Amino acid sequence: MGGGYVSAPAGSGAGAGAAAGGAAGNAGGGGGGAGTGGAGPAAAPPSGVLNGILQGACLGTPGGCPAPPAAPGIEVPPTPPSMAEIMNTVSMAITAMQLEKPPMCWTPEPANSGGGQRTGLVGKESWAFMCPNDVRESTTGPVNRAATSGVVTVTANAINTGVLINHGDGDVQLCPGALLPFTPYTDAVDASPLSPASGTPSPTCGHRLAKSSIGQPQDVFKVSATSNWVVTWTATWPGGTMGGVAPTPLTSMYDRRVGELQVLVTPN
């Protein structure tokens, strides 16, 4: 009678093969106990191994273990820039604009102007305008600039939305940016027969002198003129984009002296 057969699970190893062989030998008259087991699965990696990198070997090194390599055919997305890197590039673009404080000219001229002390009169009209020789992109706008740092590129646009004037006498006014650089004063204005006795008001940016500055510090009103620049920016980098608005007010200061003219009327 032929030898018997014993089924053994694959991968049970040499011990299972020997048992099968022994059973066959007993059933068939002492058949040899030789048997060959199936090939087992690959041994599991030791603890602490991730994608072939022994994690313990990275302890104490700056940054720890490197990132595991990407699977073939899969692109690793670029590391996005930090907010600090983005805002630094925005600052570079704004700096490149070289935006200026408003270079204002006035009637009457400021008390601290190069032409000497000037005094306005209560009841007269004061004109404010950008000095004609200083009208340029960086004073009236708009201004466009771009800056690049690392992977970040920023494009920026600045608009002068208007000049806010604090006359120092309690009156504050906003001269709109759409009317920049404002109407300049010329001697022909008050020489016109259409001018009232108090003077012609500015059609774009003016102020009626209502009180004397006598009694103020140094007998002058401290006048401020602020260009309200608004910068709109967009930052781009591989795989990302963002934008924002950066108000950028710039202020210039002036002294204005205003007095009263006393008139004595005598009968003829």
Image: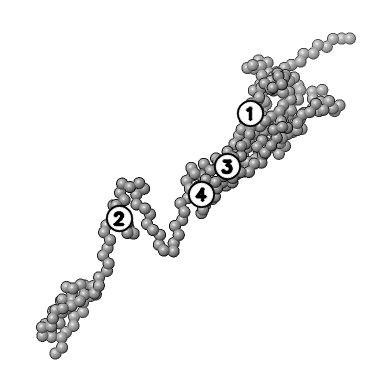
Residue displayed at 55% across by 41% down: 92
Whole-angstrom CA distance, mark 1 to mark 4, is: 37 Å
Q: Is residue 54 left or right of residue 8?
A: right
Q: Where does label 4 land, which residue?
A: 151
Q: Position of residue 257 (x, y in %)?
A: 69, 19
> Which is in the foreground here, disc 1 or disc 2?
2
Q: Amino acid at mark 1?
A: Ser
**Mark 4, residues whose alpha carbon is within 10 Å: few (<14), some, or many (≥20)?**
few
Query: Which residue in the protein does label 1 denote?
Result: 252
Mark number for residue 54?
2
Of callouts 1 and 4, the N-terminal one: 4
Q: Compute the Cα span from label 4 to label 2.
A: 33 Å
Q: Is residue 47 left or right of residue 239?
A: left
Q: Residue shown at 52%/51% (left/top)?
A: 237
Q: Is residue 35 above or below residue 189?
A: below
**From what the image shows, is residue 144 above or below residue 132?**
below
| Number of numbered discs | 4
